[in-house]
Image (cartoon, rainbow, N blue to C red):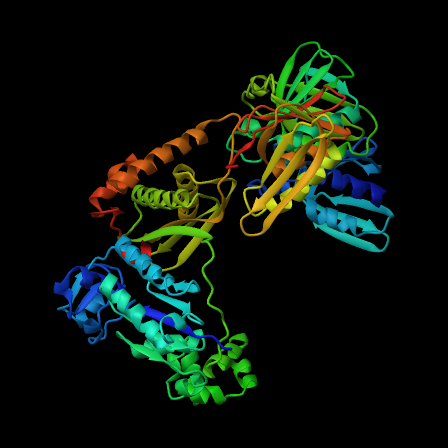
Amino acid sequence: MKLSCLQENLDRGLSVVGRAVAVRTTLPITNNVLLATDQSRLKLAATNLEMAVSCWIGAKVEEEGAITVPARLLSEFIGSLPAEKVDISLSPQTKTVGLKCARFEARISGVDAKDFPPIPKVEGGVTTKVEVEALRQGIARVVFAAATEESRPVLTGVDAVFEGDLLTLAAADGFRLAVYKLPLAKAVSKKTEVIIPARALGELNRLIAEQEEAVEIMVNPDKGQALFSLKNVELVSQLIQGTFPNYSQLIPKSSTTKAVISVGDFLRATKTASIFARDGSGIVRLVVTPGGEMTPGKVVVSARSEEVGDDVGEIDAMVEGEEAKIAFNGKYLTDVLSVLGEAQVSLETTNPSSPGVLKPVGVDNYLHVVMPMFVQW
Amino acid sequence: MSGRIMHIDLDAFFVSVEQAENPRLKDKPVVVGGRPEGRGVVAAASYEARAYGLHAGMPLVKASRLCPQAIFIQGSFPKYRDASAKFMSILADFSPYLEPMGLDEAYLDATGFESIHGSHYQMAAKIKQRIKGELGITASIGIAGGKVVAKVASEMSKPDGLLEVAPGEERSFLAPLPIARLPGIGKKTEQKLNGLGIDTIGKLSTLPLKALKSHFGASGEVLHRFARGIDDREVEPPAAAKSTSRETTFSRDTKDRSLLKATLRYLGERVGADLRRREKRARCVTLKLRYADFTTITRRQTLSQTTDSDQTIFDTGVALLNKALTGEKQPVRLIGIGVSELVEAGRQLEMLDTSTQRQESLNKAIDRIRRKYGFTAIQTGRTLRLKDIFPEGGDGYTLQTPSLSR
């Protein structure tokens, strides 16, 4: 293998695949990154067996070949080089990769590419396309609601239902539920439901942050894999096996109090209260009061800590229905309020131990359900 | 105006409680801690037993060798806890500025409260009288301008003593005493000071601060002040406890996982009951293990949701136990479980799973039964086998080294 490429491209490519490199693993080669010539490009790939990321960069290939080298070592070295041409050559006998850039030279011991876990080819299944902005929004609005604990594996994933020209993403961790609907740029032929690891979607969102082209998605539930094709980048994720809870029944059908609040005001009041709630269980109390003839309605957001002190914030609201008292974990409120781009949000509640529902005002493609905290008032 | 601090210390507390309950034990060498063939240590020894060289912390086997005629008592922590609570409530009648130090001693800021009783000395005498009258045991009291001298004074006056150090005489009071008398001086510090030719507190007080600091670092400064009888630490009423835990030593080192788990379950239930009684929830569970060679490890797990549930405490403890014992060849000598990072009650309700709600109702019901009929009245199957190992006391199983393990 013999080729040359630009330091900036190689550096960027390594950072793209870097997050798929295994961290704690029993398979040491997954700490490596694969370097392989692919026609007139250099392919970089990494996998932690749950997710694989491949990235192609322009290169001048003189001799075909492939090798794997420790990912961290290589990216640290490349990252510290000047922005010039990098010459890469492999000595097949010693499996040593020689790197040359400006007046720097390094040799890194590699491991045979044949031992690298194959990056799965996703074929068959359902193919579709999503506009990148819609996908970014969708992932950002649901992914944080997925569970981080492994006790119920399906909850560490995002439920994705492809039906007609609609994609419904949902995530739940047992305490909250986020559901977002987005249009598909290309309708699917048959309804398909899969559970995609939230980690992979989070990674995907990082990869599409600066992309403008639509993302192609290929899902094969039978093989348990999904492929996301970006510009010069591919992300393949294993799907989570199992059945996602039937969440539609968890969404309250009615409410007794509805408050429409400015997202910015609500977020500030919740963040302020959370400072005081930090030492406790994160309890933030809301008292929603309807307005009178001359007075606007309001939401009082408060928190107290036995040892530290307490905090009360008041925000204007348009309130329909009865007065309501309900307590939430402050983090769950700030998590959802932080991802809303809309100016106003509605909060619907029924009683202190029934879920609260948040919906951005003016759109009907997102809803967020949060279980309250049981507290003494 | 400088304050007046009292240090009140109950004499041979555990033993005195036993003697008050059973007068036949009076004036005899009595040891609380367990059976002489047991593996525990002396938790308390009567003054008669101390004459034979017995002291707290000594292995029971050695104690019985030194004093074979001693009467060995298992001891009962709940009994001592009750006596301690009465002791503290008596003290609280005299001054609200009360700082308990363990079960059997406390500092009391008596500044200004003496006028009701005549003088500080008379106030202390009344405290002793009430303790004697209500608990049937004796206390020793030291009165001085600061905590450290008050403690030395109560220690000097023992047993059943009362010693007041007049204001301004703290330094001259300490001067002739051997350095080991000064709180804060342990074996190592004592040896080091002896090496420097310092044997009395008086000599220590003449050492320049710089010299002490170079030998003992930051604690040199404390020594310097204490040796001259200067101690401006205030009497601080205790803050609410930040953690709670239970532990026990096995009568024989064990590798029996099911025994370890049964014990862990029992201890965890005690911890859970404690949490719920105090209306707190915990964010963190800690497992403690001591192996046969006395190496002690603690392993902790932070929970994503706070808990006061026996099941969660146990499940977390077992996970930590399994992890700790993986690859560990030694048997276990001591096991303990505790919770920390306590927060006010307030439970996150669940959306998909009602098991925690059900656990909560279960715990409530069990707590009610236990309050009425005793701790062992209702148990999980897992802890049942402890029945054959530990004797049942009035309030749960009587574990080894009750004084140390509760």
Query: Is residue B240 something that shows in the picture?
Result: yes
Query: Is residue A205 something that shows in the picture?
Result: no
Q: Position of residue B144 (x, y in %)?
A: 41, 78
- Outermost residue to the top: A189
Where residue A233 sits, quadrant-wise, is top right
Image position of B75 (left or right of A229): left
Q: Position of residue B334 (x, y in %)?
A: 33, 54
Q: How many marks?
A: 0
Q: Nearer the viewer, residue A203 or B97?
A: B97
Q: Position of residue A19 (x, y in %)?
A: 69, 39
**With respect to residue B29, does B393 lie above or below?**
above
Image position of A244 (left or right of B358): right
Q: Nearer the viewer, residue A327 or A248?
A: A327
Residue under the point 23% across and 57% down: B75
Residue under the point 32% across and 64% down: B104
**With respect to residue B291, does B125 lie above or below?**
below
**With respect to residue B108, does A194 lie above or below?**
above
Image position of B122 (left or right of B50): right
Residue under the point 62% across and 34% down: A286
Image position of A305 (left or right of B269): right
Q: Position of residue A377 (x, y in %)?
A: 53, 37
Residue under the point 44% across and 71% down: B112
**With respect to residue B113, does A47 lie above or below?**
above
Where residue B49 sits, quadrant-wise, is bottom left
